[in-house]
Amino acid sequence: MDLVIRNGNIVDGSGLPSYLGDIAINDGRIVRVGNVADTGTTEIDARGKIVSPGFIDPHTHFDAQLLWDGAAKPAIEHGVTTIVPGNCSLSLAPLKADHRMKLVGMFNQIEEMPFKAFEEGVVWDWETFEEFVTRIKKDLTINVAPLVGHSVLRLWVMGNESMHRTATAQETQAMQALLKECLDAGAIGLSTSFIDMDETLQPVPSRYADAAELDALCAVLGQHNRILQAVHEFYDNDITVARIDQLADISRKHKITTTLSPLFVNNDNFAGVDQAIARVVEQNEAGARVWPQVQTRPIDISFTFSVPSLLFIRLRTWYAVMRFGTPETIMAAFRDEAQRKQLVAEASNMMGLWQRLILRQVKTEANQQYVGKNLAEIAELRGTDALNVMIDLSLEEDLDAHFLSADMGHNNDEKVGSLLRHPHVMIGASDGGAHILSFSTYGDTGYLFSRFVRDNHSMSIEEAVKKITSDTADIWAIADRGLLKSGYIADVTIFDADLIDRGPEYYVQDVPGDGHRYVRDSVGVETVIIGGAVAYTQQGGYTDERRGEIVGGRP
Amino acid sequence: MNTVRKSIFPSAQDTWASIAARELDSTNTEESIANLQSWNLHVFARPPAPADSPRAGNPILPSDILFIEPPLA
C-alpha cells in the first residue's frame, strides 16, 4: 500500500456513526476501510483523531489565485480538498485577449482582487476554457470543479454589446455552443448573477440576459446533467422567494440542479429566512432541485479607505469617492470642508454603525493607544463624533487605518445552526478567495465544527462531515469523492475534534504586486491528503505533492 | 403551493409605463407607475445608466424580477 492511516475515528461522510479503523490507499484511491493488515510505504497514526473525507467548498472565487497558487492557500490547511471557483457569473475563461482588462475590472470590483495582482501574478496564456484548464492543471494541489460564468460567455459572444442589451437568437445559439464547449472541457456548470455591478458601477453582462436566454443555456446544462449557480438579491426576502420559484421552474423543465447563494439569517427578521426555506421545501417536494447555500460564519467587514468597501456601497457619495478616487483624491475629499460636510451628512443617519466600528490596526505610534477601542470610545476621548473620528484617523494614517465592523448579522447561533442542519440547505457560500480586503473567507469549516458541533451541539460531527462532503458531492454530481469508501479517490482530512477551529483573522502581504489580504490559519487540522498523497501537515506545512485534478460533473 | 407575491420578468423593451399598462388594472397611468415603482424599490432606486447608454433613463433590466402587487399582508 502507498499509504495506511491507522487507528482513526472514521467519520466516513455517510452520516453513519463513527468507528475505529484503518484506511488503506493505493494509486490515489481508497482500497480498504476497516482493519488493514497490509503495511504502507507511508503510515499515519491517527489515534484519537477524526478521519473524514476531504471537505468540498462549493462557492469560491479562487480563479485568479489558482494562477499563482495551485494550493489555493489557505484552503487546504482548513481541510478543504475540492473547491468550486467561477461563481456569480465570473470565470477567467473563456476570455478573448481584448476583454482581459474588462474582466479584471469586474474581478476587482466584485471580488476585490487588486489590479496589481493581475499585472504581476498572471501570465495571460489562454483564451478558451480548455486552455485555461490546461494552464491551471500544471501546478494543481487542490481539486478544482470550475464553473463557467454567464457574464464571460456573453462577453465572448457579444463583446461590449453584452453590457447593454439582450442577445439575438443567433447570439444565444453561439452562447449555447460555447457553453457546451466549456462543459466538455471540464466545467461543472454555469454561474449567473442577478445582482453584481462592474467596475463602472453598471450591471454585469449576465444581468442583461432575459429569461429566454437563461432558459436556452439551461437546456444545454440539462443535456450534460450540470448545475446552475445564481447569486440573487439576498437582501430582499420577496425577491429571494421569487428567485427560488424561477430556479425551481428551470430545474423541473431541464432536469438540472440549481443553487442560489447566499442565504443569510437576518437577526431582525427570522421569518424571512423561514419563508425562503419553506418555499425551497415546497418546490423541491414538487420535483425541483433548488439548494440554497448558507455560510457558517457571521458577517464581519473590515475596511480602509484606500480601497472601495462593500460597507459603503449604498452610500453613493462615499462609494464614488472610494471607487473612482486615488489615495490623494480621497484624502483631499476628506480635507475639503464642503466635501467632508457632504460625506458626513450622507452617513450621519448610520451613526450607530460608525460608533460600533473597532479600530483594528494603524501604522503610527501616536494612534496605537486607540487600537481595539470602538469609535464611540475614541470619539469621546477626542471630543468629537464617531464619523469624524473615522475620517480624522484615516487622514492621520494616510488611509492605512483599518476598521472592523463585527457581528453585522447572521450571528444568531441557534437560528444559523438550525439552518445549517436543515436537509434542504447546502453549507457553502464561503466566497473563498474573494473580498480579500474586507474579511477572511477561510476557515468556515473549522468554525462549523467549533461553533455548531462542539459549542452549541446544533448537529453531530457525523452530520457536519456529511454536510460538507458527500452531500456536496451529490448535489454537484462530483463522482467518487465525498466518502471514505473503497474505490473512491483518496481525499482525506484528519483533524482533532476537540481543537478544530478557525484561527484569528489577520492582515498579511502575500498577494502578487505587494498586495494584502485578510486570512485565518487553521486550528486542529493535522493532515490533509489529496489524491492519495499528503498535501499538508500541521507540523510540516505544505508538501510538494501536486495531485489536484479538474473535477467535472458526473455524466 | 402557498401563495406568494405576484411578479413578472420584464421583456427587453419594457418600461414602467409598458408594464403598468399591461399588468395593472387601472386607468390612472401615473398612479399605476407610481405604485409599480414603490413595489420595486430595488429597481427604482438603482443608479441611472449613463446618458450614452441604450437604456439611459430606464433602470429596468431584462433579468429583473418586478412585483406587480404590494407586499402580502
Image: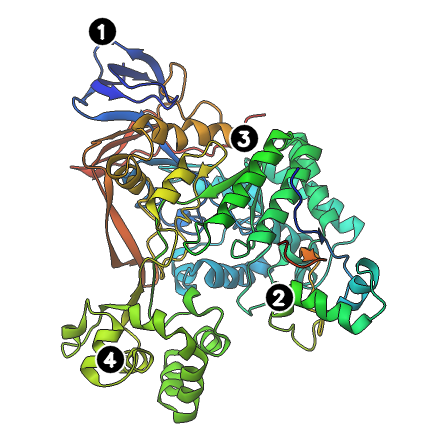
Which of the numbered marks, if any, corresponds to residue B61?
A: none
The extreme bottom residue here reads A337
| Spatial separation of the CA atoms under disc 3 and disc 4 | 55 Å
Q: Which residue is nearer to you in this view: A47 or A1?
A: A47
The chain containing the residue under callout 1 comes to A
- Disc 1 residue type (three-letter): Ala
The extreme front residue here reads B73
* Label 2 vs label 1, nearer the camera: 2
Which of the numbered marks, if any, corresponds to residue A379?
A: 4
Q: Earlier in the sequence, mark 1 or mark 4?
A: 1
Q: Earlier in the sequence, mark 3 or mark 1?
A: 1
Taking the image as drawn, is residue A95 in sight?
A: no
Mark 2: secondary structure: helix
Mark 3: secondary structure: loop
Mark 2 highlights which residue? B41
| Spatial separation of the CA atoms under disc 2 and disc 3 | 39 Å
Which of the numbered marks, if any, corresponds to residue A37?
A: 1
- Disc 2 residue type (three-letter): Leu
Q: Residue shown at 38%/16% (left/top)?
A: A485
Mark 1: secondary structure: loop
| Spatial separation of the CA atoms under disc 1 and disc 4 | 68 Å
